[in-house]
Image: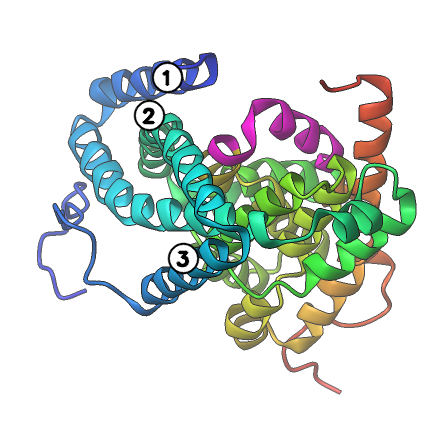
Amino acid sequence: MSETNKGTQPPLPKFRALPKSIDRSLIVMILMVVVAGIACWFVEGQEAFVESFSSDLKMMMQIVPKLAAALLVSSFLQLMIPRKLVAKWIGEESGAKGVAIATTIGAMTPGGPMTSFPMVSALAESGTGRAPLIAYLVSWSNLGFQRLLIWELPLLGPTFLIMRYIACLPLPFLAAWLATKIPMSIEKDPKS
Amino acid sequence: MLDLSTIILFLIALGLAMMAARRQPHIVKQGTLMSMERFFAVLPRMGLAILAAGFVSKLVPSGPIAHHIGPDSGLYGILLASLIGGFIPSGPSVSFPVVVILLQAGAGFPQVVAFLSAWSVVALHRMLIYEIPLMGWRFSLVRVVSALPLAPLSGVLAQIIIDLFPMK
């Protein structure tokens, strides 16, 4: 970063009133909708098309407030949880406690792989064991609150979410335990 | 339009904003702007995903899906769903609508849980783009091997939970 202000205030994110210039994934999705819509119209008939369209609109109306609320929560949490402190917590503890902390923090880590992997890589370099690292990754990808709030809750509903969460809660611990049983180095360039 | 879970989320957001206002007031503005920016980024994707899912679910024949990964497909369905989920190379904007389609076409909850676990934990695309370059292939291999049993296990656990507490 070339910015000169080193105050405590991080720079404000750029705000765009309109969606980012239409990118590739959006075009792919638009094409998918068009193709699926045309196929639906011709294969299943106009009635099925209209029925599908109107029930989708209803679903959208229900999702909009949910999405807004979910985004507020996830944005505030993302800004309020100091990443450096978090890395310190995971790095310092070991054993079952370390795995439990890594699991909790993994679930709380917002953002995509571009935020989580740099942290995992830094932790690995500072000597954190494989068990907490793997617990962290499993927890972040499977139990991460951001994905859960933004996608799972609006699309699949709270009952499904709670059931799945309980079923998946043991996964980070199991993966961490299994990882310690694998007789193989995880170093990038093991010195032979 | 506002159900209980939405109201709870808004209350949590309000609580967080109040906490932030006391300690780091700039976060309130920053967080609100960030949410708005994301809202406009996610909303068109979600809208398109729902539309595509709606049309596709009309087209997908529910017979084979209900047969192979339906609620009565048991362990076979859980294993099959885990296998398919592990090969979905995309982010949540594809996988969650796929789950909506599968459920509408008659897939069972435990099978769908296994599908989501496999997709999220194995994540081939993420492995190739981020994990192997940053962590090395040895780490990736150890992680994937330790993650293999997770998806089927989560499906079995989901089945147990549903048997204990039947969902409507």
Tell me where residue A102 appears, x and y as whole percent: 61, 42
Q: Quadrant of the N terminus of chain B?
A: top left
Left or right: where A154 falls relative to A175:
left
Label 2 with label 3: CB-CB less than 8 Å: no
Q: Which residues are magenta?
A: A153-169
- Any mark on residue A65, and which? 2
Q: Amino acid at mark 2?
A: Pro
Q: Is residue A76 above or below residue B63?
A: above
Tell me where residue B11 appears, x and y as whole percent: 36, 13
Label 2 with label 1: CB-CB less than 8 Å: yes
Front residue of A111 and B134:
A111
Same chain under badges 2 and 3? The reply is yes
Identify the residue at horizontal 61%, vertical 60% (top origin). Answer: A127
Identify the residue at horizontal 71%, vertical 28% (top origin). Answer: A166
Question: Considering only order in the chain, which callout, 3 or 2, is on the residue closer to the N terminus?
Answer: 3
- Residue that carries the numbered disc 3 in the rendered image: A33
Tell me where residue A143 appears, x and y as whole percent: 60, 39
- Label 3 crowding class (10 Å Cα cut-off): few <14, some 14-19, many 20+? many
Front residue of A165 and B48:
B48
Identify the residue at horizontal 18%, vertical 37% (top origin). Answer: B33
Colour scheme: rainbow
Front residue of B163 and A47:
A47
- Residue that carries the numbered disc 1 in the rendered image: B1
- Secondary element under disc 2, as helix, strand or loop, is helix
- Label 2 crowding class (10 Å Cα cut-off): few <14, some 14-19, many 20+? some
- Label 1 crowding class (10 Å Cα cut-off): few <14, some 14-19, many 20+? few
Q: Residue A163: say if magenta.
A: yes
> Which image quarter: residue B110?
top right
Whole-angstrom CA distance, mark 3 to mark 1, is 26 Å
- Any mark on residue A124, and which? none
